[in-house]
Amino acid sequence: MSTLFQPLSATSAAVGDDVGQSFTFPAEQPLKLDSGEGLQALTIAWKTFGTLNAAKSNAVLLCHALTGDQYAAGVHPVTGKPGWWPFMVGPGLPIDTNRFFVICANVIGGCMGSSGPHEINPATGQPYGLSFPVITIRDMVRAQAMLIDHLGIETLFCVAGGSMGGMQVLQWAASYPERVFAALPLATAARHSAQNIAFHEVGRQAIMADPEWNGGDYITKGTNPRKGLAVARMAAHITYLSEAALHRKFGRNLQDRAALSYRFDADFQVESYLRYQGSAFVDRFDANAYLYITRAMDYFDLAADYGGVLANAFRDTKTRFCVASFTSDWLFPTAEAKKVVHALNAAGANVSFVEFTTDAGHDSFLLDVPEMFQTLRGFIEAAASARGLPAKGA
Amino acid sequence: MSTLFQPLSATSAAVGDDVGQSFTFPAEQPLKLDSGEGLQALTIAWKTFGTLNAAKSNAVLLCHALTGDQYAAGVHPVTGKPGWWPFMVGPGLPIDTNRFFVICANVIGGCMGSSGPHEINPATGQPYGLSFPVITIRDMVRAQAMLIDHLGIETLFCVAGGSMGGMQVLQWAASYPERVFAALPLATAARHSAQNIAFHEVGRQAIMADPEWNGGDYITKGTNPRKGLAVARMAAHITYLSEAALHRKFGRNLQDRAALSYRFDADFQVESYLRYQGSAFVDRFDANAYLYITRAMDYFDLAADYGGVLANAFRDTKTRFCVASFTSDWLFPTAEAKKVVHALNAAGANVSFVEFTTDAGHDSFLLDVPEMFQTLRGFIEAAASARGLPAKGA
């Protein structure tokens, strides 16, 4: 695997050990893309947790969100912090690594080892940069299907994810219905809204406005659009939280001072917090990857591939769905989740829907929400039973 | 008046004719600022519409929002477009220029002729830049009071404005209760929330990340942080609209193309619209002024000046208030307006409150909302009658 990820972090020496696995598909197996292009020498990097059973019937695929990666559980090798779903994935947790074989792959277009703009193009020996093809959520899922084939798994017991991960879950259920026994799309939508696109466009423009972006060729030119990427992250981060959460966490509290400075320092805690979010993010993420992945989300409109009728994406599906949304999520509001549920009902699918009451906004799906764990645990247990998997503790 | 505004626009030759009036106060009349500093040689630029009556009892002061200016009505000299309140201010309109003497002044810290970072510091002959003192909403209002004194007006019949303009209205009523007969704070709040501050901080960081900002010295260095300011405007602009308005206006419609480009062009109309909003804005606004004015809004917390009890800001007020909010405004939501109303009620003030049903978001107060015009017209007529002004058409 060729990766340029290491230079992003001082802890790069540790990455090699813990990056999980990766595989580069032979040139005669290119990834066919929605754009019409093909991606040769597709590399996928992934992590697994738990053990695949003999029947290969206990595999759970986790799909990560925009800035996530394959480190759903355990310790993230760059940040040294827990993976992105610490309350959901692990021994005894709802996605129980004692019982399930959990797979999480870095999306294509990402920057943690799967093919993306940050990686070396094997055909040129240079980083792809903007020569990397624009990809879609369906392309991400198609690449994951190649990985699942590579692992010799026919049917996934469950595909789960939130936000962009939830988009992939919906796309999996639509593209490969016979390969998805249960689907858990959380805090997501079947299409990106105008407001969603608008916020992403602000982030992209912030990156491209940074002269260190250098038309996307910053790696070869030895620059890094850190400031632009940090601004993009700051803007996005606000949308991941609710007004109530920001008020509860920070209100108008001052940061390390007793009075207003009458300067442009970070007087308020919320300013300091956002600046930290921006600067920490650039240590672990690639600016071009941010462009590609936001673009993929903006392009997502599942109904459009099915004559504009979302229900047609799920015709005759046997998959069991649990769709979940959060009251305080204004980025992927409950109204969007309900559109998915209505379409599933119209398609006669087996679907549960639950809206959790939280004040934490879109990020709620990543947080410690006991009601969510209880509900999802119940859904997963019932699905496991229907799948013929041994009961918990059996 | 010394102004560097002209270089911002190709239509600068016309600005001189139509900039309205301006006055520079003598050095012995500095503006006392909340920071403890004093601003010498305070210049205020303003426009008037209509005629002051002999009793000087028909003056209406309009307070503009973040990116507004003194051009509330008529044609804006830079953009060639109508002023910012075309549906509200003019002959026969709710703020009737046939009956009232309407004054609108550029706020200090702004960039349309009043003292601000874009202007020449008379003490040095150089643009203020970041040597301009950080100012507050109360400072803006204190400067306006100096202007009203200069015009020989004792009591304003009405002070009106939306968003930051509404903050100034509340500050006027608190600081000079005996000088405000009627107050119209629209789409506003008595304090800036954590989420409001967060969005402003993103804008400031976008500006400061632009190397052409040059630590604020861009005028003397011959640069202009256009890209940073455009990104700031794009992020802010999203917050001025509702998700519903963006969906209604643009949805996922493509811009000048039949299919996705699979590039980073502005495929979607909403992207194209935002890019236009960003680039048009930098032709008429100054990046440092954006920093100063957003800071003033962030600092606004009216209750904090009154022992944390907002009602104390309005004790014994005789002013008649009409507070208005809009259902789709998520930047200054109705909950914030209600806090103002509760405080006014607690202070025993004469207050009407109305929430208008719109889907246009925060910008609703600037738009053609017939129900709003009808309501505000009624409030203004009743106040005019109480003030002893002749009835409409009399």
Image: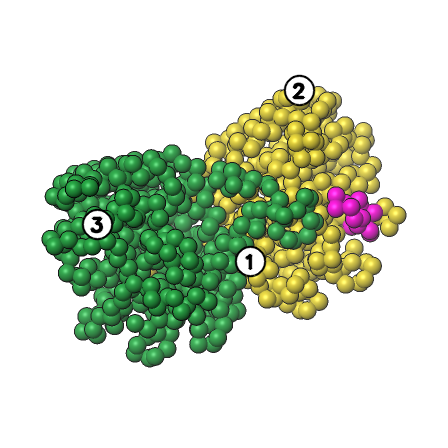
Chain colours: A green, B yellow
Mark toward the viewer: 3 or 2? 3
Outermost residue toward the right in this view: B28
Q: Which mark is residue B348?
A: 2
The residue at which mark 1 appears reads as B206
The residue at which mark 3 appears reads as A100
User: Is B38 a magenta residue?
Assistant: yes
Q: Are marks 1 and 2 on the same chain?
A: yes
Helix, strand, or loop for circle 3? loop
Q: Amino acid at mark 1?
A: Ala
Lateral position of residue A181 relative to residue B350, left or right: left
Q: What's the residue at 59%, 35% (across, down)?
A: B189
- Could you give the CA–CA distance between mark 3 and mark 2, rounded to whole angstroms? 65 Å
Where is residue A228? Give x, y as percent.
Answer: 51, 62
Q: What's the residue at 26%, 57% (across, down)?
A: A48
Observer-nearest residue: B57 or A31? A31
Q: Earlier in the sequence, mark 1 or mark 2?
A: 1
Q: Amino acid at mark 2?
A: Gly
Mark toward the viewer: 3 or 1? 3
Q: Are marks 3 and 2 on the same chain?
A: no
